[in-house]
Amino acid sequence: MKKALLICSLAAYSFMSSQDIKFKDDHVFIDKNKCMKYTSKDMTSHNTFYSLNGDKIFYIDVAENKRGEGYFKIQFTGSDEIITALPTAMNFRKGFIANMIEEGVLDPKNCQVNLSNVKTFKDRYNKNFEDTDTTVIINNAPADSRPRNGVNIRIGG
């Protein structure tokens, strides 16, 4: 009973502490406060986010590697870090903003970016999609190693 109560209280806390993020009329609203502007090109595949003053904050772009796998590139103005990640929600923009708030990169009260937390965000969400082509060889020994009629050849160790 205590475990069920603990789980319910943790779920209620996370629900209450999560931010309400909405996109409307080229603006991002966090907890009903206008936080930033954004532009979106090519069916939302290229997104740039701006402060309400018009200063560029970060961008999220869709990219594709040599194998045809799609992923997202995120970069913040003032940081050399480029984060490549999978979408974290059905609405990837909302999901990434929620993750930025959770990691302390974006302050939901004043919509300021804390560049010192970008590395933590990258450490948690970055995935390398530009790996060169790799060949994987799996060498499994047969379960039955008794000699059979014919020649038994083992390659490898």
Image: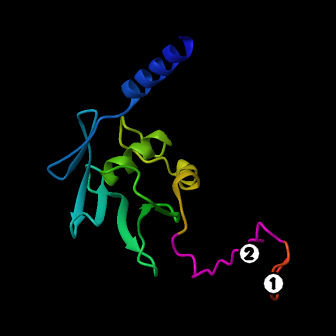
Q: Secondary structure at mark 2?
A: loop
Q: Is residue 137 left or right of residue 29?
A: right
Q: Nearer the viewer, residue 87 or 19?
A: 87
The location of residue 32, given as percent across then percent down, is 23, 33
Q: Are marks 1 and 2 in contact (CB under 8 Å)?
A: no
In the image, residue 37 sits, relative to residue 142, either above or below, namely above
Q: Quadrant of residue 47?
A: bottom left
Q: Which residues are magenta?
A: 129-145
User: What residue is shown at x 46% (from left), y 39% (from top)?
Assistant: 102
User: Could you tell me which residue is drawn at 37 percent across and 24 percent down?
Assistant: 16
Q: Quadrant of the C terminus?
A: bottom right
> Residue 35 location, x and y as percent?
28, 43
Judging from the image, the colouring scheme is: rainbow
Identify the residue position indicated by label 2 in the image: 139
Q: Amino acid at mark 1?
A: Asn
Q: Is residue 154 magenta?
A: no
Does 138 lie within the magenta span?
yes
Q: Between residues 8 and 76, which one lies in front from this camera angle? A: 8
Which residue bears the numbered disc 1? 149
Give the residue at the far front of this rendering. 149
Q: Callout 2, which amino acid?
A: Asn
Q: Residue at x 29, y 35 (%)?
A: 20
Residue 69 is situated, as x and y percent measured from the top left of the image, at 42, 72
For residue 56, above or below residue 97? below
Report the Cα–Cα distance between label 1 and label 2: 23 Å
